[in-house]
Image (cartoon, rainbow, N blue to C red):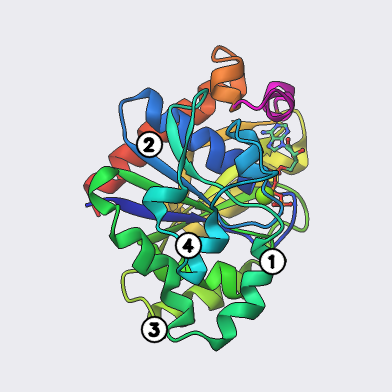
Amino acid sequence: MAKIFCVANQKGGVGKTTTSVNLSAGLAKIGQRVLLVDLDPQGNATMGAGVNKAGLQASTYEVLLGTAGVAEARQKSETGGFDILPANRELAGAEVEMVELDNRERRLKQALEKVDADYDFVLIDCPPALSMLTLNGLCAAHGVIIPMQCEYYALEGLSDLVNTIKKVHANLNHDLKIIGLLRVMFDPRMTLSQQVSAQLEQHFGDKVFKTIIPRNVRLAEAPSYGMPGVAFDPSSKGAQAYIAFGAEMVERIKSM
Ligand code: ATP
Ligand code: MG
């Protein structure tokens, strides 16, 4: 059975997509079968996986509305070694169009059940909002990975996300839990980064992943080449960190 994880944080620009794409590539590198679901109309994960988001035959949009299956809509990320269910701006319309449908928060879950046997991991790149799209991600998942920057405002808004996860757990998906907080874009030279990082460990204990993702320009450059950083420059510090994070996730799921 595939383990399904949302990469979520309603804050924008905190590293969700970079984490989704590079964790997918990192897991693929150690032999895991991975599907990355782009659940964001921005389509950044799609582009980062090397798939052109313009003119998709089928995408997450069609899958949510039930006019295509995942098996037809998925594509290969040649550079990343994983499959991607791609998305583009069309997906923004799904939010409104799903209002009419039954079980609208479980559309993604139902669609993923049909390809479950094909994968070890399914990762879902969520948009920066606690919207119906994100709710579909949370209903489909076993757990949530929350990327965070170690800055002064890091904890701001975290309680909204945690409360949403609690509500979904109580009412819609009893499997759902927070797998962990991932420290990203970390700059060890900044005292503030060190302090916030220590605070996170104090508050959240073993819910904080051991792996820390450093700020690394190679990770930021890679998407413009349509490649995950892990494939673009495998020896860079950022790529190495995401490969290590993949190994940490493989360990984590053994105890789930
Ligand atoms: P959104 O909320 O818009 O979907 P996001 O949470 O998915 O954003 P990303 O797109 O992954 O965030 O990252 C935001 C920006 O930070 C991007 O330009 C990305 O290249 C850069 N970035 C992410 N992680 C790192 C890192 N470890 N080192 C350097 N740059 C990074
Ligand atoms: Mg994103």
Q: Nearer the viewer, mark 1 or mark 2?
A: 1
**Mark 3 / mark 1, whichever is N-terminal:** 1
Q: CA distance from mark 4 to mark 1?
A: 13 Å
Magenta: predominant secondary structure element? helix
**Residue at the limit of the structure toward the top, as seen here:** 235
Q: Which residue in the protein does label 2 denote?
A: 248
The residue beneath circle 4 is 63
Q: Nearer the viewer, mark 4 or mark 1?
A: 4
Mark before the other along the chain sequence, 1 or 2: 1
From which residue to which does the magenta span run?
Answer: 216-227
Query: Which corner quadrant of the image does residue 4 belong to?
Result: bottom left
Residue occupied by mark 3: 170
Picture coordinates of residue 189, whole percent (x, y) = 75, 28
Task: Give, as a three-letter code, the residue at label 4.
Answer: Val
In terms of secondary structure, where does tag 1 sit? helix
Using the image as rendered, state which of residue 110 and residue 201 is in the foreground. Answer: 110
Q: 27 left or right of 133?
A: left
Mark yes or no: residue 130 visible: no
Q: Residue at x 35, y 59 (%)?
A: 112
In reply to whether residue 179 is colored magenta, the answer given is: no
| Residue in view at x 71 percent, y 52 percent | 42
| Mark closer to the observer (4, 2) | 4
Report the residue at 34% width, 25% height from top: 30
Dot 2 crowding, Cα within 10 Å, few <14, some 14–19, many 20+: some
Q: What SS does tag 2 mark?
A: helix
Q: Nearer the viewer, mark 3 or mark 1?
A: 1
Mark 4 and mark 2 in contact? Answer it, CB < 8 Å: no
Instruction: Measure the C-alpha gap from mark 2 to mark 3.
Output: 28 Å
Residue type, label 2: Glu
Residue linked to disc 1? 92
Label located before the other in sequence (4 or 2): 4
